[in-house]
Image (cartoon, rainbow, N blue to C red):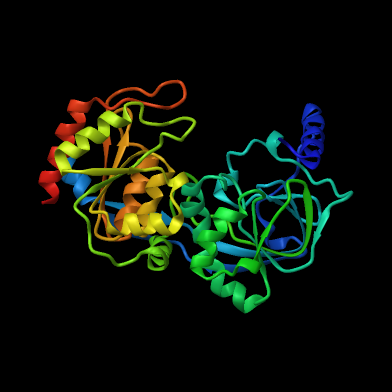
Amino acid sequence: MKSFRRRIHDIHANLRAAVHLYPKIESDPGSAKQVTVMPLIEAGEESVSCELEARFKKQTETSTLIRWPSVNLYRVENATVVGDQANVFLANGKWLRVCPSLGTLPLKKVRPPIYLGATKLNAPMFHLSGRDHENHGHFLFQHMPRWLAAQKKMQEANPHFKILVAKGHLRWQSRYLTRTGASEEQILECGDGTSRCKDLYYLPQLRGQDACISRPQDYRSMNEFFHRSQAKTERALFLSRKDAPNRYLINEDEAIAEIEKVFGSCRSIQLSKTPLDQQIDLISSASVVVGPLGQALATSLFARGSIFINLDAGHGPDSWGDAFRDVATICGNRALSLYSKTPRTADGSFTFPPDALRQMLERVKMLIQ
């Protein structure tokens, strides 16, 4: 249920949109008063192997190129942040739009500030909310790299800073943050209304406009924090989406049966019912991890030396399937996507023909032996 503040902000935004009164955009804040631009990330590129998938598809190209742009850290004095996505507004009322994730956000969906009754945040804040913050995959792939890239600079700028995360998500996001150098008392939840921040530090996502992932070194850093060295088990691990409202594998039980035929045995888990420590143990020790396209595959950040198999609908390729493959590879695993050649339903779910899946899995097994 929406809070009273959220409803007021929605009404305010809808009334303004009805008369086409949208926030003004600031996409080049270098000359704006009360904004300090601190260059942090240089543009670069890195070749990442996709050897297993290339061999499976009999392709000659065995690597892909990950590119990222130069990125600045912005210190914004007297900033205003609005909503659980924490859209940032400068003191002059302009919406700060320098993150690639905001390029496709319609102006009518950007709630402007309501200053009356706004919450005051006096401590220095590092902004770690934004679009798609509620999804574990997006948070790990697109938001956590911001934290890892800025952590040292933030300590130098003000060691007493707080980390501002989205309302309603502090509990699970803090589990990742505290494993990567943050403390529990350092993490603060923003509201779903307007907050006035005396000293805000904002780092956009470290990726290009059309890319899903950013610098490989940030994923390697996460893997250093998360991975636990363990002996590999022979049992395959299936990442179930039975508890998902959409985009699940309709014939999951049949798929698990085919995995067992090929790999001998298979354990199925739902991440929503598995504590993070247990997730890390299971993923770190798994020889083969299989799952339908979705946020569960971001657990490749916990693994090294494993095989990750993404099951997807259609004929491929898929940009997020490629992203999961690439992050798995960056962390020292091998990965590929298998496509069902069947369409998705209205809610994005799909069926993977059992015979086709078994044949594909048998070929994968031959390639990894």
Question: Could you tell whether 358 is left or right of 270 in the image?
Answer: left
- Residue at x-position 57% and y-position 48%: 133
Q: Percent position (x, y) of residue 91?
A: 80, 57
- Residue at x-position 16% and y-position 43%: 264
- Using the image, determine if residue 212 lies above or below residue 312: below
Question: Could you tell whether 126 is left or right of 278 in the image?
Answer: right
- Residue at x-position 55% and y-position 70%: 151
Confirm whether residue 146 shows in the render.
no
249 or 161, nearer to the observer:
249
Question: Could you tell whether 117 is left or right of 309 in the image?
Answer: right
315 or 344, nearer to the observer:
344
27 or 283, nearer to the observer:
283
- Using the image, determine if residue 181 lies above or below residue 350: below
- Using the image, determine if residue 245 lies above or below residue 128: above
Q: Percent position (x, y) of residue 321?
A: 35, 41
Q: Percent position (x, y) of residue 79?
A: 76, 58
297 or 52, nearer to the observer:
297
Q: How many marks?
A: 0
